Structures are given as C-alpha cells and as structure tokens.
Image: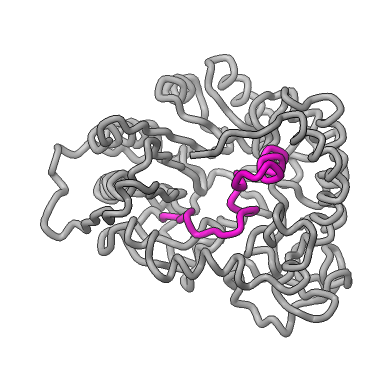
Amino acid sequence: MAMSTEIHLPVLGETRNASRPSFALPAAARTNSHVFHAMVKPSGAACNMDCPYCFYLHKTDLLGQSRQPRMDAQILEEHIRQYIEGQNGEEVVFSWQGGEPTLMGLPFFKTVVELQQRYRKPNQRIENDLQTNGLLIDDEWADFLRDHKFLVGLSIDGPRELHDKYRFTKGGQPTFDRVMAAAQRLASRGVSFNVLCVVNRDIALQPLAVYRFLRQLGGIIQFTPCVEPRDFSAAAPARRDPASAPVVGTSAARPGTPDSIVTDWSVDPDDWGNFLCQVWDEWYRNDIGRVFINLFESTVAQASGLPAQMCTHAEFCGKGLAIEHNGDVYSCDHFVYPEYRLGNINETHEAQLAYSDAQKAFGFAKRDTLPTDCRQCPHLKYCWGECPKNRIIKTASGEPGLNYLCTGWKKFYSHINRDVMDIVRQLGPLPALG
C-alpha cells in the first residue's frame, strides 16, 4: 500500500519570517500580463508504477532523492504564496505531477486548496490540474477532485494489450483494469478529465485502434511522442556532444537498430508522422468539433494567427518551470538535470527565477538555436523545431540541432495543410487569446 503524507495547515503567518523570499511585480506589470507556469512534483520521482519509458523515474538517483520524497508544509506554503504573488493574471493555474502526485494523499491536497484561498488575490481565479496514473483514485478522491474542480489528466496508452506492455506496477502487474476503473469512477462522479497517451514504437503502428479506443473515453486527447536517448537517465538535453549526433535518415536516427541513439521503445519518426496523419483523417472525417486533440487544436489556432497552445510548438519556451519536492526549481519538466537548476524557493522567489536572465536565455534558445533547415522550412510556423529535448540529430548537411521527429512532422503538416486551410476559412477570424 502506498504511503501518504498528512500535512496540517499552518496557522496564518506560522511560516512567515524576515528571510522569506519576496518579489514585487514591475511597474509595467500593471498594464501587461505577467504570468508563468510551474509543474510541481510534490512526491518527487516516486511512483507506484514502473513504466520503462518514464522520463522521470530515474530522477531519484540523479538528484539524490530519498525513496519516499515528500513536499513538506513549509515548502508547499512557500510555493503557493510565491506562485500567486508573482503573477497578475485573472487566472492562476497550479499543476501537480510526479512521479505520482496522489501518493501525497488527500490531506495534502486539502491543504493545497486552503492555502490557495488564503493567498488568492481579489477577483483572481485559481485552477488546479492533476496528472495521475489513476491507481489510487477511489470515491473519496473523485469527490474531492469534482468538488474543487480539478482537471485530471489520466494516463492510458490505448487498448489493454498496448497499455499493459509498458504500464505496469512495481511488482510487474498489469494496470489496464485499474486505470479503466478510475476513468469510469471519474466520469460517473462528474470529474473533468483528459486522456494522456504516450505514443511509443508499438502504439504508433496502430493509430486507428488507439484513437478509436481513447475517443470513447471523452475529454481532450493528448498524444505525446516517446523520444528517449539511450543515455537520457544521466545526460541532460542539449548537453551532448553534437559531433556524435547521427544524420537524419540514418539507422542511428531510428529505434531498434544496433547503433540507434534512442531506446527501443522510442517512436520511429516516420511512424509518428503516419500515426498523426491517420488519426487526423479519422478525426477530420468523423469527429471534428466533437473530439478534441490538443495538437490538432493548436495547429488550427496557429494557422489562424493565434499563439500555439502547446509550449513544444511555440516560437519560444521558458515559462513552464518544474518545481521539485524540496523547492528546487528547474527550467522545464523535461530539463530536470543539475545543469538546468535555477535555484530554490527557500532562497529566491520563484517568480524571480522564472523571469531570470538564465531562464530567458533558455526560452529564447528554442528559436535561436534552430538549424538552417528549420528556418527555411515551410512548416516552421507550426513546429518551431518542436521540443528542444528532441533535437538530437543532424540535418543532411551535418548541422546539429535537428529534431529527431523532423521527417514525421513534415509528413504530418504536408498531409493536413489543405484541411487546415479549409477549417480556418470556415471558422473565420478567431478571437485573440488572453
């Protein structure tokens, strides 16, 4: 049975002292939006599952975490206070991830909502989202999530045989039935939830079977390509020797080959493109306006002249921090490595870290380090080189920094271009975001 940590709500001001980091919004923030986002890992890398493809489980060793890392009351209150204090938007979104955040237990999250109300600014709306594997979701959890309007992201990798191949417990037991039970419990109790699917090498070969299965669960579908260099557990993204990167199209730039730079379960670039094309065709013919897929929604928005709805497809990144259980702040959820540690919220206000020169440089590098092939690509406005963590190969001319999935993205965007333009014409001008 997973252990939980009970957190007692501190008395107002109990943790306050002169050394608490402070931050004042700049004068320009009175008229301009001053927002950032943080993905919080209250249980660190601890999880009750043992998925081989998980990009976070290894952080226990990499960061020297205990076997049961837990965010304590003082760190929790500091995060909530600083996160709200450092923003002036009408909405502040708290995101809870892991590891597996439900290992913290319900008392922790009851404290979360109490502290949020304590520090909330007048006329400010607080939202929460929780990414979970669903194994600990019982009736009490579901009722709490509904009552406090948490948006849940439930991880499920399609039908039983595909889901259970990589998503099993620490004891090697399959989890499909338990996750489906969680989905049914959430739905029956009126909890809003989206479906998160990691598209690995096997799943990419069955696009319609996976999509049709996930479609019936409702909610937004989020497809995440599985791309993991063989040394991902120790080597930070963008810190590898570019001279050793393989050239696009070579055997080393594909999974399942002796010289491959990625794990065997990583998705093949061309299969990723084919997966998206087939899902798009099914969605466009039968489900547009009824089923929502985050990548497709973002592509249409971008074609309409609006910003990307996903950080991976934006021109810049850097406004999405990761905060570990001990208060350490990192540049991004996928860059939780010592090289990308910005500081600790006990020492420096997290808003100051979010707007720091180091983080600005990290964000601008997404655009500024694009190879020439990307800058000249007709799909640049949709892709922007996708996530920097996946820029691990070279162009045909030998320039480093090309996205591992490049050929797949090109295939997808070429395939849907006419459809996207038709959708944009039918929609007409869209309202600006924000």
Residue 311 to residue 283: above or below: below
Q: How is the image coloured?
A: one colour
Q: Residue furthest bottom?
A: 243
Left or right: 409 in relation to 367: right
In the figure, residue 104 lies in which quadrant? top left
The x and y percentages for residue 171 are 62, 45
The x and y percentages for residue 302 are 67, 45
The x and y percentages for residue 137 are 52, 28
The x and y percentages for residue 337 are 50, 67
In the figure, residue 357 lies in which quadrant? bottom left
Residue 155 to residue 415: above or below: above
In the figure, residue 406 lies in which quadrant? bottom right
What residue is rendered at 41% in x and 59% in y? 66
Whether residue 284 appears in magenta in the rendering, the answer is: no
| Nearest to the observer: residue 264 or residue 381 | 381
What residue is rendered at 34% in x and 46% in y? 31
Left or right: 128 in relation to 30: right
Residue 233 to residue 204: above or below: below
Residue 30 to residue 189: above or below: below
Q: Which residues are magenta?
A: 295-323
What residue is rendered at 84% in x and 43% in y? 416
Left or right: 259 in relation to 16: right
| Nearest to the observer: residue 248 or residue 232 | 248
Q: Is residue 173 visible?
A: no
Whether residue 305 appears in magenta in the rendering, the answer is: yes
Q: Is residue 394 visible?
A: yes
Left or right: 105 in relation to 216: left
| Nearest to the observer: residue 259 or residue 224 | 224
